[in-house]
Amino acid sequence: MDYDVVIVGGGPAGLTAGLYAARGALKTLILEKLLPGGQAATTYWIDNYPGFPEGVSGPQLMMSMKDQAIRFGLEIEMDEATDLLVNEEGFAVVGQNGKYTAHAVIVASGATVARLGVPGEEELRGKGVSYCATCDGAFFRDEELVVVGGGDAAVEEGIYLTKFAKKVHVVHRRDRLRATRAIQERAFKNERMDFIWDTVVEEILGDQTVEGVHLRNVKTGEVRELACKGVFIYVGNIPNSNFLKGKVEMDKKGYIVTDNDMATSQNGVFACGDVRKKALRQVVTACGEGAAAAFSAEQFVEEKKGIAYK
């Protein structure tokens, strides 16, 4: 075996699992298709992670997690998992660049932001359509922007965009936000934020770049156009679990089903973070699950090697 544990995904769950596994003297590898940190690394400000009274930037927190895990011997490889092979000896995680064998696997592959699925979205992606305010917000100084969604991510990123934009219009299909109360209070106090209730975006308008959106009120049927230069979309997530189809139990949406010890239906495979079926998806819960998954994987590996667990 190349490794004791291979972890798929380098977000908060994966990095914490890597920290705990490496610190437990397991030879551990993280496969990360992009940059370590996952979606949290593109979040401008995290206000509810314990130990930071004034909050902490997502990139800073994720970089610290990565450095801490590497200090204990964690290896990180830039590769995307495409399949999982199971045999009597263990597992082989198949990546685009190679195959990585291990006694146990921890899946922390996270989730990808969902698309709105309206005309103009794909055509204008990167030309005013974005899914990351931290990445693209600075390109829209003194412009009017639209944020689609009503959860924590939508409202938090909308607040961030007011650092640059003249006005941020939050378009939500319901008559109230789903974001936590503390985030809502900050948003409602922000003079640069405007809320358009009971409304959906039916089309993103523009030729070479975004020029506006076509809106429809779901209660009255009223339609109108709103001029803007950017559309930031936060309407949910899709679990990154396609490479495991038929290998472990999932729910209808593709989220991986585990027990309280993060064990999946396949013995020796564990899952944690946003790819796992659960009610709350936050950095702090991802970290807790990552630690639990690493603990379970350590027990599994040591039992497999015939080492008495202490």
Image: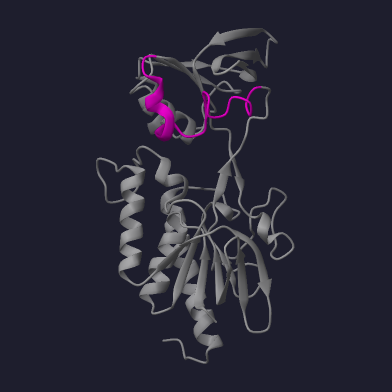
137 is within the stretch colored magenta: yes
Residue 225: quadrant of the picture: top right
Residue 83: quadrant of the picture: bottom right
Q: How many marks?
A: 0
Tell me which residue sits at (47%, 64%) in the image: 30
Q: Nearer the viewer, residue 74 or 251?
A: 74
Q: Nearer the viewer, residue 214 or 185?
A: 214
Give above or below for 73 relative to 190: below
| Residue 271 in view | yes
Residue range highlighted in magenta = 120-142
Q: Position of residue 232 (x, y in %)?
A: 51, 27
Horizontal side of 24 relative to 83 (left or right) equals left
Give above or below for 276 relative to 177: below
Horizontal side of 98 relative to 35 (left or right) equals right
Q: Nearer the viewer, residue 41 or 138?
A: 138
257 is within the stretch colored magenta: no
Give above or below for 216 relative to 176: above
Q: Position of residue 44 (x, y in %)?
A: 36, 37
Q: Position of residue 116 (x, y in %)?
A: 63, 30
How did the renderer colour the structure? one colour
Quadrant position of the N terminus in the picture: bottom right
Tell me which residue sits at (57%, 20%) in the image: 175
Q: Position of residue 229 (x, y in %)?
A: 49, 16
Tell me which residue sits at (40%, 34%) in the image: 134
Give above or below for 46 relative to 118: below
Quadrant position of the C terminus in the picture: bottom left
| Residue 185 in view | no
